[in-house]
Amino acid sequence: MIRFIFFDLGNVLVRFSTSRLARQGAELTGRSTEDVLRVVYGGIHREIESGQTTDEEFYEHFCLELGCRPDPEAVAWAMNDIFEENEGIFPILRHLAELDVPRGILSNTGSGHWNHCCTFFPYILESFPTNHLLSYEVGARKPDCAIYRAALSMAESHIPDITPQEVFFVDDLKKNVDAAREFGFDAVQYVSDEQLREDLRFLPERKAPQSNCKIHNG
């Protein structure tokens, strides 16, 4: 029996584009998209997501590596404005809310991406008002088992007797799903909305509203 559900953020609740980040970074700095990707994803992004590097430290790294010094706010916007709504998942989130299923977000993310998504995609906090398990706050990233242990503790704070097998996790990356399963979670890889609805078939169907009209015979 599933008693708590965690969703990944990027490419599950919202879609993101690294090519968009590279293009925006290149337009801002005059450097190549390859150089921008090298600087952003050469390792420092893992430090940001694990809370080891601040936004200010990333900016200094970005400027040093690319040999320029654009406006800090412009850099932040180029790095964060890479997300789009995933409209296909809306009905699933509404269904979970209507059923009041205990749920949360389990994401590898930094403060910049998280704050941007919460600001520009209000359905995230509407669908998940609490239970945000974010790597930069925990100090661990998927697929490290430490973050799944923290997720289980969060679920236990709501359902004290819950077991790992009663936690369901949705992520777009197979390595994160495999690690969650190894920890004991029931986990699936997000491929499509149709597939996810099938994976969530254990949820009860919504009950049709009952009419207050009386049927009169005769």
Image: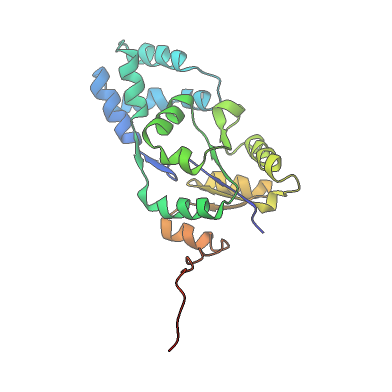
* Viewer-nearest residue: 125 or 113: 125
* 43 to the left or right of 102: left
Q: Is residue 13 left or right of residue 144?
A: left
- How many marks the image carries: the answer is 0
Q: Quadrant of residue 105?
A: top right
* Quadrant the C terminus occupies: bottom left
Residue farthest toward the right in the current orientation of the protein: 161
Using the rendered image of the protein, determine whether residue 89 is visible from the camera's viewpoint. Answer: no
Q: Residue at x 32, y 25 (%)?
A: 78
Residue at (34, 40) in percent of width and height: 84
Identify the residue at image location x=36%, y=26%: 79
Snapshot quadrant of residue 75: top left
Q: Quadrant of the N terminus?
A: bottom right
Q: Position of residue 138 (x, y in %)?
A: 61, 28
Residue that protrudes farthest toward the front in the picture: 218
Residue 134 appears in the figure:
yes
- Residue 200 as seen in the image, left or right of residue 82: right
Residue 129 versus residue 68 in the image, above or below: below
Residue 57 point in image, percent of width and height: 46, 13
